[in-house]
Image (cartoon, grey):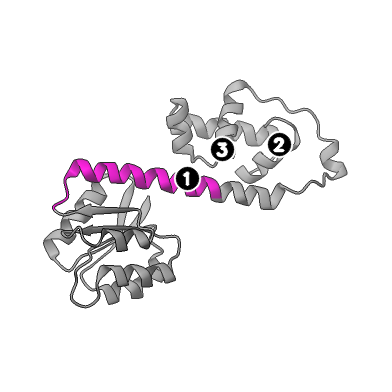
Amino acid sequence: MIKTIVLDDEWYNLEEVCELVEKTGFMQVSGKYMNPIQALEDAASLSPQVAFIDIEMPEMDGLSFAEKLLEIQPEVMVVFVTGWNHYAVKAFELNALDYVMKPIKEERFLKLAEKIHTEIIRKEQLSYAELILSLYGKPQISPVIKRLPDISLNERETQVLTLLSEGLTQREIAERLYLSVSSVKKYLSSIYSKLSVNNKLSAVQKARESNIL
């Protein structure tokens, strides 16, 4: 689940955004606040991936809050939710993911949710690729690796492993290949057994060393 925090000094608007977040099925409200100071205090421990922020608030405006939040959580995606359109330029100067006008239409929020989901997947795949490169991207090949025996995976197992190497989760692999999650788990179990490994990083590494990927 994608972790979010929601900040708005008006209770009705706060609850409305929280309800829309939870209805997506893939985002959860980790913290909801009417007080920006409290939200900042909790941010480090909550590590939100997305922050929905009102702009005009009495204790601290949303733009200032976003700046401080990004100092604590540089990777957080900021979405401003406001009744005023004249803050848009300043909002995007903070690299906001989106700027949503109140009252929020459900159709508009669903498009925003898709945008968030896509961006999260992109970041996860990039991070995973960087990790693989940092761990296994060196050109040295040990004598043990050179003597690896031939390993045979069937077509479906190869498809599952390829998507795994791209950073997709088991659920995403299932959706991509029109399989159940349990079927994906069975294929992974078979792959791990054939490759004599017990985790996905080792599986991807060994598959590349064996020219499977």
Between 114 and 162, the one nearer to me in the picture: 114
Residue 110 image position (x, y, % from top left):
25, 42
- Residue at 50% from the left image edge and 32% from the top image edge: 184
Q: Main secondary structure of the magenta part?
A: helix
- Looking at the image, residue 207 sits to the left or right of residue 22; the answer is right
Amino acid at circle 2: Arg
Which residue appears at 66% of the width and 25% of the height? 153
Distance, label 2 to label 1, CA atoms, is 22 Å
Q: Position of residue 48 (x, y in %)?
A: 38, 61
Q: Which quarter of the image is occupied by the C terminus? A: top right
Above or below 38: residue 190: above
* CA distance for labels 2 and 3: 13 Å
Q: Are marks 3 and 1 in contact (CB under 8 Å)?
A: no
Q: Is residue 203 above or below residue 127?
A: above
- Residue of label 3: 164
The region drawn magenta spans 103-126
Residue 51 coordinates in the image, percent (x, y): 32, 60
Mark 2 residue element: helix
Whole-number angstrom distance, CA of label 3 to CA of label 1: 14 Å
Q: Three-letter amino acid code at disc 3?
A: Leu
Location of mark 1 (residue): 122
Question: In which quadrant of the rendered view does residue 50 lie?
Answer: bottom left
* Residue 121 within the segment the image draws in magenta: yes
x and y, in percent, of residue 11 in the image: 13, 64
